[in-house]
Amino acid sequence: MEDVVSHDQARLVRFLPSLTELTVWLRPHSDVNQTSPFMWLLHHQHDSVMVIVGPALKTLPGRVRLLNIQSDFRYNGHGMTRTIKLPGFHQLRSLTVAMEHLGDPNKIRFQRSDGSLVKGDPGKTSTPCLPSTLKSLHLISCTRSVFSLLCLLDSFLPGELHLTHVTLAFDMPTISAIIWCGASYKKLEPLSTKEQRWLRRLVSLAQKHLRVEFFTTSPLSLFITELNAVAHLSDDEIAIVAGEGLQSSECVARRRDGWFRARSPAESTLFLLHGVKHRQLFCSFIFDFTRWTDTVFFHGNSGPDFEMHTDATACDEQKSNT
């Protein structure tokens, strides 16, 4: 179903009084000069989109409980992101939508059935408002502002929202998604520090009975496990692990109980030189890096002087034997 619904579709909806699940397709922009009525309406709605329009469908939003909004890359025109508006969806329980259509996560508001906001000021008319009745929110093609959204959700007191389940899907591997999210913060600090803060945020949300799940294109990768691993790696270690296309959990050091730990600066230096090729050894809880550094076999000789000394010693030994 597109933004502008035909009369035939409206008639079909009237014959389905029990309709509670709906998929809406946002029509791609094809008019570059924005001269068609469809484009004109969008322009004068402050770049926000009413996903269901027309008087014939005015009663539909009030009974929809599951809404799935689909679009493709052509939907946004000239680098401008179109945000959605959901007025009248007072029975909505589940929403699936691309994250970019929610706009700035810090400006999202939750609206009660009487039109009042759960928290915050109404703001501009383009501010996206989600129904406070939502119990599950499924965001696809997530942007790097995921943790800003989770911060917003964590700012609500227990019971202010009905949300109990949020899924966040990225169109990229896990390690790439973690680094991408970290790049969204302007404050200069180690990526591991950001991850530690994000993990505390997830714990806080869990305490409020809000379950958060992450999905990426990486097979058999648990996002929170990888997040924990990255929180124990230095920025240089993260860079080399990502460059090799490895999971962070494959390359993090382990404690005797099997959980992750951060490496000392000396351990990290050694890992950057040899760890990726020998990660099973370097990540073992029984690995003692001092034995590696104290053994000539592993770190080589000391240069030309060492070679000259070795040659001289060999000659002396040969003379004594003769």
Image (tube, rainbow, N blue to C red):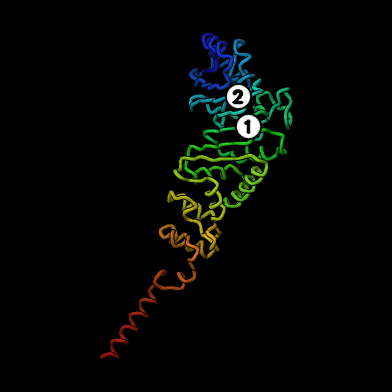
Quick one: SS at disc 2? loop
- Identify which residue is drawn at 46% across, 54% down: 250
Q: Earlier in the sequence, mark 1 or mark 2?
A: 2
- Identify which residue is drawn at 66% across, 37% down: 153
Image mark for residue 252: none
Question: In the visual, does 195 lie left or right of 295?
Answer: right
Residue 140 or residue 208, whichever sits in front: 208
Q: Which residue is mark 1?
A: 135
Distance (Cα) linking label 1 and label 2: 10 Å
Residue 259 or residue 54, whichever sits in front: 259
Residue 214 or residue 93, whichever sits in front: 93
x then y, percent, for residue 84: 60, 25
- Residue kind at label 1, given as amino acid type: Lys
| 34 in relation to 150, above or below | above
Quarter containing the C terminus: bottom left
Residue farthest toward the front in the current orientation of the protein: 18
x then y, percent, for residue 98: 54, 30
* Residue 69 placement: quadrant: top right
Question: In the visual, does 89 lie left or right of 121?
Answer: left
* Residue 184 placement: quadrant: top right
| 155 in relation to 97, above or below | below
Quick one: SS at disc 1? loop
Question: In the visual, does 239 lie left or right of 320?
Answer: right
Q: Which residue is mark 2?
A: 65
* Residue 146 placement: quadrant: top right
